[in-house]
Image (cartoon, grey):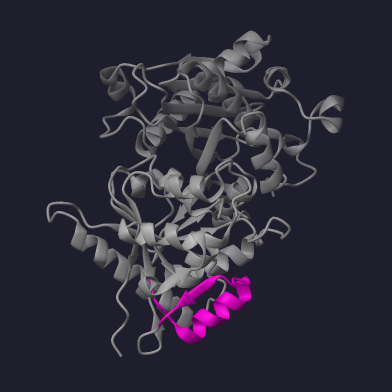
Amino acid sequence: MENGNPKNSRNREPGPVAATEKLDTHHKALTINLDPSTFGSFAEIGAGQEVARWFLVVGAASGTVAKTISAYDKEVSDDLYGSSSRYVSQERLEGMLDSEWSQLLNQLHKSRGAHTCFFSFVDTVSARNYSGTNEPHGWVGLRFQLRPGGPPNDILLHINLRDASNFLQQEALGILGVNLIYAAFYQLKNKESFLDGIAQDVEKRIEIDFVDLRGLAFEMWDRRALLAQLLHAGIAQAVFFSSSGPPVPPTEVLYKKAVVLAPGYFEHVDPIHSEMHARMLTSAIQQLRGELDEAKSAPRGFFCLPAGPRRPEDLPPAVPDLLNRIDALLARGGDVLLVREQELYTMTEFVNRYTKEPVRFVVGLSLLIRAWEDRYWNLGGRLLEALSRLFAQNVRIYVYPMTVVDLRQSIQSLSATRWEWSEMNGWVSAGQLRPTGPLGHLYDYALASDFLVPIQIPQL
């Protein structure tokens, strides 16, 4: 096997330095340049030629670089890679990979194929524009061989650039590209070392919210587990799982959409709980549809499952456990956003990157009480700051009612003693619930301002 076999020199840390410490970007690029069996091409669009530049400046570039190209003009790009509806897209990335790989083999296979592991690195990126009005993101791809003459393997990434300036985003992209090429040749032992290697030195600067792996090098890898691992590694803010197709980056399903988010841990995966969750989300989508102009497209609904622990002292859920919960939700026809953090305001901030349309949460009373009880010690403004972040840009919370029995059990499990309520036919809605003391005034304000919207108690 090529993936992870310790006898495979391509997956062995090169040199004595790498055995004891992580190599920086300079030494990673130089290591590849000094490896006589590695040779490839670079095609970069949209953020300079920052990846190729590393290999050109560290020395011995002739040992690695067959070609560098940057086709900024759309007509030139179309002529090289075929026309495309979007220039920063997976479609364009795959066209670049196919073209560059075909050229590389046609030109060099006869002379170098018997002793060379070829690779083609490509990216198409929308870095920060001059006006600062775009959402910087891009697609990054690598096609490579693990042995001379071997079959090609592909790594496709979707990235979000989080630095504030175009210059810094270009710099971070250069580091990421070197990391990716190095990880493909030397860090394929397991998904943890692979992801750590890719993200080294850009953890806070670049998010990776989509990974697609193809080829024999990855035949034993679980692609869905790798997506979940992006959250555990702190590389992504959220990843998306679809009930009706393959995973895609979150921007593909959130962009300019009215959105309903159903947050929860969804620890019960039995059909009864799954049906209840699906009913809550469906009712919220219908309610938001009634608020929108008829010309607007239908809202999208998502279950939001945090990948982190409930409490700081707890361990995060294991990846297989998360995937079981995701599968239970997908089985009911619901799409899932696996998110890094559990606070609702972090979900608001994330979704508002991609849409200015209405955003609605749908929660049960127990989650509402938990959010109101949290002291938010990580925020300077505590609860008030959390609420101001949560309700930014046309956000509301639809609150699904609970039976009195379930409400009492939830309050007991949360040790929440400062709540009072009335009931109707054994049910309690958000309008019949209220915290005692000063928090009650804030709660009343949220209700009166339609930040909290009670969903009607079900008819018996």
Residue 138 location, x and y as percent?
43, 32
Q: Residue at x 79, y 44 (%)?
A: 6
Q: Is residue 364 left or right of residue 82?
A: right
Residue 206 location, x and y as percent?
54, 32
Say if residue 256 shows up in the picture.
yes
Tell whether position 417 is magenta. yes
Relative vertical location of residue 4 with respect to residue 131 in this rendering, above or below = below
| Relative depth, front residue between 391 and 265 | 391
Q: Residue at x 62, y 44 (%)?
A: 234
Q: Quadrant of residue 200?
A: top right
Q: Is residue 88 left or right of residue 17?
A: left
| Relative depth, front residue between 246 and 327 | 327
Residue positioned most to the left? 295
Q: Residue at x 29, y 33 (%)?
A: 86
Region of the chain picked out in magenta, as a range: 400-422
Q: Residue at x 25, y 66 (%)?
A: 287
Residue positioned most to the front? 437
Count of all numbered marks drawn on residues in the image: 0
Residue 275 location, x and y as percent?
41, 79
